[in-house]
Image (tube, rainbow, N blue to C red):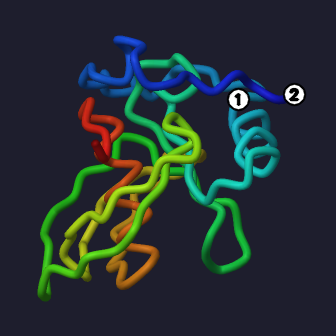
Amino acid sequence: MILQIIKYGDKILHKKCQKIKKNILFEGLFENMFNTLLKYGGVGLAAPQIGISLRLFLINSFDSRKNIFLNPKILNQFGVYKEYCEGCLSLPKIFYRIKRKEIILIEYFDEKWIRHNLLAKGFLARVIFHEYDHLNGQLII
């Protein structure tokens, strides 16, 4: 199923998302989010972009796997700031030059509630930063 992407102007995109409780059921949600992400040609999608105010995003950009991030927390940022042009599915056809650190350390749970720490660099770090910002009600504009 393809989900509706929430566009700029909707209040949910400006709210800090709630932490997910471990016993919540996500039946079909991850698959629907990935189908939506692929349909619109994105590399990441955060829950508020589909109208759900929970700390969840997914990425389809590394290890040729679908990567689900539940209750993510950026632990540290490293390196120098690099500027890059970013787009967003909630801001169609709009791009901004954004400066972000080039390396991050993030802690998150996967869909099986296994805790992970990931040291991400370059493009992957940028995508994670972008989706993480959505969970805190921040947009690239």
Q: Residue at x 25, y 76 (%)?
A: 83
Foreground: 104 or 137? 137
Q: Earlier in the sequence, mark 1 or mark 2?
A: 2
Residue 33: percent from left, percent from top:
70, 37
C-alpha distance separating marks 1 and 2: 9 Å
In the depicted structure, whether residue 18 falls above or below residue 59: above
Helix, strand or loop for disc 1: helix
Foreground: 115 or 46? 46
Q: Quadrant of the C terminus?
A: top left
Q: Quadrant of the N terminus?
A: top right
In the depicted structure, whether residue 15 falls above or below residue 132: above
Give the residue number, with chain letter if any, for mark 1: 29
Q: Residue at x 28, y 22 (%)?
A: 14
Q: Residue at x 36, y 54 (%)?
A: 130
Residue 99: percent from left, percent from top:
20, 69
In the depicted structure, whether residue 61 falls above or below residue 46: below
Give the residue number, with chain letter if any, for mark 2: 1
Q: How many marks?
A: 2
The numbered mark at residue 113 is none
Foreground: 82 or 122? 82
